[in-house]
Image (cartoon, rainbow, N blue to C red):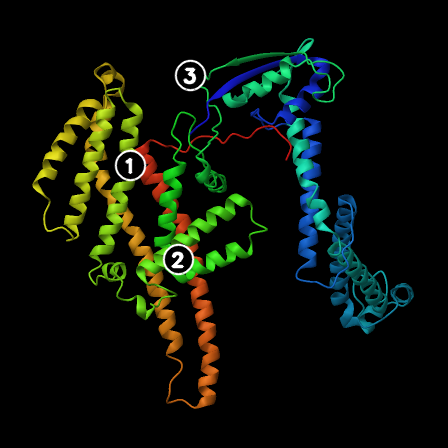
Amino acid sequence: MIVKMKHLDLVCVASERESTLERLRALGAVHLDFAPSASAPVVAAEGEFADAEKAVRSILKTRGRRKDLEIRPRAVAEVLELVADRATLAVESDRLERQIRAYEPYGDFDPALAQKLRERVEGLDDVVHLPETLPECSLSHMHEKLSRVENRIKVDDEKIASSDERRILESFPRLRDRIAFEKARDLLADRGAVSVITGWIPVSRVKDLMDIVTSARADLFERSRAIGWGVLLRDPEDGETPPTLIEPPRMFRPVKVLFDGLGIAPGYTEGDVSVPFMCYFSLFFAMLVGDGGYGAIFLAATLALRKRLPSAWFTLLTVFSSATVLWGLLSNTWFGAGIPWCAGWPTVTWLADPSYHNMMLLCFTIGVSHLMLARVWNGVCRFPDSTFLAEFGWAGVLLFMYFVTNSIVGIFPAIPGPVFWVFGVSLLLVFGFTVKPSELKTRGAELGMLPLNIMSALGDIISYVRLFAVGLASVKVAENFNAMATGLVSSENAWWLNALMSVAMVAILVVGHGLNLAMAGLSILVHAVRLNTLEFSNHKGISWAGRAFRPFRKN
């Protein structure tokens, strides 16, 4: 569900601004709408964070893949000083190299002696062919200076590469907290003797806030006296956009990290689609990858990284990869090949239909169930408002378009007669109850768009055939790489040639399946996300225009 929010106006004594922000941060339940700020404290905090990031990047870039270094702790300022010194030396090195290339044709000579001779002997340049502009030192001296500069660059590189970036990375949460704190300080508007700050707090955390406000315990936040706050809480008003805090059932909470990773959030007044999103995304993941062998690789990698992955990502990736392994069992597809003793399984035989009708039927069935779920869900939520009938009408339209789609591709020989009756009744519900009579002046134009929307429902269902097409493409690519690799070895070849070809065969299999695996991951980001955030969301009424709830708290 989407947690209800309260708008918070908090008034404190101006002299207590710092302690007020500290308490709010310790509470960790208030969302503050930070705005870009050019105040000196914010700029300084952001600059310190940028310096730390630059230092870490410089360390990792300079170190490369070297493992033979003795890592030593260095402050950010020391690292950046080394980086700046190295940059200056690099410019000097480049200048000396250009100077050496310019004067090398003239050989090694003393510029001071050449200048004296030029002043005393007329026509010397025509005889000796000296350059028009003499260098500041001899060529040998230039080489010595270049050698010293290059040695200093190597020393700086060694120091930078041997710096402990983990020490700096550990400071990132503190630096982010400082930026947030300074931005929060900017939000505290002074009103004479008092300061005011506004934000959003979940209804479930209001009691925690009020406990702090009303508590008389001096040691609640290690303070010597009670708090003097004025608090005003109210419901969101029209035109306001509260942040969205999703609290799915415990079993489906890991999907929140997927939303965060994609940078999406439903609007505050929209529905929480976490449960169907995770269920259908798992199914889409499995069908788009289309190979149980790849799923096993995903699962093995997930288990190997268990200690490094956050628990939510570990759960999510385990579910997705396990679903892919299960799909491999049902379709008997393992690295583009099949296990012989599984070939006779009913699911394998059904999915292996040469006409691909069964596979397309499965995709269309998944699609219509996905979209009808959105419409029926809307209808249940809108009941007893009369518009709930329009949503059930849309479910009937989708059912009719499902039969039309299967008839177009030849899966169904004809559309059953009763389906036309369902379609007729559904059209009446859609046109009769989408807009109320009292809303005809303001929303009457929507009725004119209904024919186009009804036709687009056909395209929405057809869109789910991508699950079959992309999955089949992945399997065919794997099969072709297998055929290419196995074709290198032949009984007619000499043993040494077969040995050589075996090495090439392994290389082709590794590279080929690696590329196919990468393409499968890309297809998940494109197609699985699209089917959930576009087709399904359009029918559910989810715009994904919300902003995630980010409480002001310590990292």
Using a 10 Å C-alpha cutoff, classify the residue at mark 1 as few (fewer than 14 neighbours), some (14 to 19) or many (20 or more).
Answer: some
Tag 1: residue type? Leu
Return the x and y of residue 432 as percentages of the image width and height: 17, 23
Question: In this orientation, which residue lies closer to the viewer: 268 or 226?
Answer: 226
Residue behind mark 3: 238
Return the x and y of residue 443 as percentages of the image width and height: 26, 21
On the picture, is 257 further left or further right than 88? left
Tag 2: residue type? Val
Q: Secondary structure at mark 3?
A: loop
Residue behind mark 2: 325
From what the image shows, is residue 175 above or below residue 101? above
Instruction: Report the Cα–Cα distance between label 1 and label 2.
Output: 26 Å
Q: Is residue 123 visible?
A: no
Residue 555 figure quarter = top right
Label 2 near label 1: C-beta < 8 Å? no
**Comparing marks 3 and 2, which lies closer to the viewer?**
2
Question: In this orientation, which residue lies closer to the viewer: 81 or 251?
Answer: 251
Residue placed at 38% from the left, 70% from the top? 481
Badge 1 or badge 3: first in the primary sequence? 3
Residue behind mark 1: 373
Instruction: Report the Cα–Cα distance between label 3 and label 2.
Output: 48 Å
Tag 3: residue type? Asp
Instruction: Report the Cα–Cα distance between label 1 and label 3.
Output: 29 Å
**Comparing marks 1 and 3, which lies closer to the viewer?**
1
Residue placed at 35% from the left, 44% from the top? 280
Residue placed at 38% from the left, 30% from the top? 271
Count of numbered tags? 3
**Comparing marks 1 and 2, which lies closer to the viewer?**
2
Q: Secondary structure at mark 1?
A: helix
Residue placed at 50% from the left, 18% from the top? 6
Badge 3 or badge 2: first in the primary sequence? 3
Q: Secondary structure at mark 2?
A: helix
